[in-house]
Amino acid sequence: MRRTAGYSAALKELLCLSKGDWTSLLAVSIELMLEAKAVSRNKPLVFLLILGILILGTFQSEVAGRQGSTPVAIPSLQTLKLLDYSKAENGKQNDAVGYAELEELINACQTYSKGLDVLPRFHEPILTRGESGIAVFRRVSPSVVMVLTANFKDDKVTESGLGTGVIIDPAGYILTNWHVVHGFETGIVFLKPAVGTEPDKNSGYGLRLIAESEQADLALLKIVKPPAGLVPVKLGDISAVQVAEDIHVIGHPHGQLWSYSSGVVSQVRDNYDWEYSDGSKHLAKVLQLQTAINPGNSGGPVLDNNASMLGLIAMSEEGQNLDYAVAIDVIKDFVNKSLAARSRGTEARSPTEKGVRYVASTKEGLSVSKIVYSNLVSYTIRDSKSIAIGLIVETSDGGVLTGSNLNAFGGFSEWIYKPASGKTVSVKSSGTAPDLVSLATKD
């Protein structure tokens, strides 16, 4: 056995072993701990050092097991389709990414593509409405976002909505109208462009619906992985609202992005009820406004001269020159209750679809789980240790979604979506939901 004077060399050996065979690592660790019994001086330090190296070795071993020393090539979609599949028994391996998550990723990519068609219309406006209007626009417009939603049937866009939203918290919470997002399966938010409107300079961010109030026509959204530096709008106070007060509005009327208009508060009306063309009925305290409001303004902030938000644009009465915004006290109550409910874990989960599972193996020893859904087919590829190394999805219209680089939450950190026609889209994900959606650098 080694003597106390030999600890330094032994520990060096142990550190080297921590990068290799864990059984040898364990044997040397036990030998060192047995010798340490005869050493009273620095014994706690020796034990702590050995324990630290053991933990390091275990961690490195796990990482090596997940990543492997040599990356395994993912088979092509054509290769996967030609494999000899057999129907799997119930209760076998869980999906790496479920149907609902795949739908969310694909819809986010398709919605982002629509945004690329709209974004080039934006040009920084030339402001001519006086110093107060210019100051308010420059201060608040970075807090105003474009909310793009799309509904899909057989992978085709059946209807889409472009609305306005406003950042109310730097953690990525966004307020908009219920009627902007209701009935839509997915959403993408674009921040105000800082430099030009080229698609490769403007990424879209995936959204999650946190809460909605049909009665008050309000919805709270959250960016899945918000970027740093989001600037929230300052919330005003209903008690400070005055009839005939000047107000400022920022939104996207008729797709004219980040447009500015001004007007005045005509009246504050309690328990005002209104109805949309889809038959939905609403009731809330509102600000009656005299200003220019058009489709696309919905969800935009109504601001005072101090750039504080007094309300959220909801609707206008055609031919009456009467426009309405949900009042700020209603907004505050809705947001506070929504965040409190979220902290209690009362968020609803959307239902998912169960597909039919088949299994096969490749000649390289990879296992493949094929799941057939109503509108897509997914192929999860696993290595010899049953670790998912990739996932390929083919939609019914010929689009292909490919996931790679397994992340810590069971999803894939990198996704590429190639539509049957159109531009290829890239998605970053830290879990299973889309975080950042961008135009792929190459097809």
Image (tube, rainbow, N blue to C red):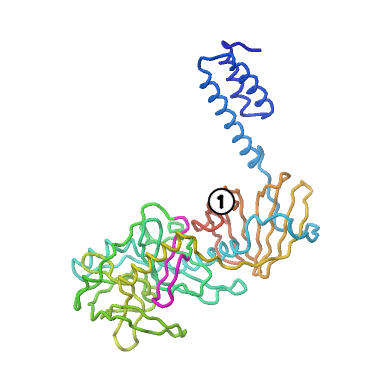
Neighbour class for label 1 at 10 Å: few (<14), some, many (≥20)? many
Query: Is 222 or 259 nearer to us in this picture?
Result: 222
Say if 294 sits above or below 206 in the image.
below
Say if 82 sits above or below 164 in the image.
above
Q: What residue is drawn where x is 68% and y is 66%?
A: 354
Q: Indicate whether residue 223 is drawn in magenta.
A: yes
Residue 371: x and y in percent read 71, 62
Q: State which quadrant residue 400 falls in.
A: bottom right
Say if 230 sits above or below 334 in the image.
above
What secondary structure is marked by label 1?
strand
Q: Which residue is mark 1?
A: 413
Q: Quadrant of the C terminus?
A: bottom right
Say if 278 sits above or below 224 in the image.
below
Query: Is 217 or 133 nearer to us in this picture?
Result: 217
Q: What residue is drawn where x is 53% and y is 51%?
A: 430
Q: Amino acid at mark 1?
A: Ser
Left or right of residue 220, residue 391 in this image: right
Residue 266: x and y in percent read 23, 81
The magenta stretch spans which residues?
209-225
Q: Indicate whether residue 406 is drawn in magenta.
A: no
- Residue furthest to the bottom in view is 319
Q: State which quadrant residue 395 falls in.
A: bottom right
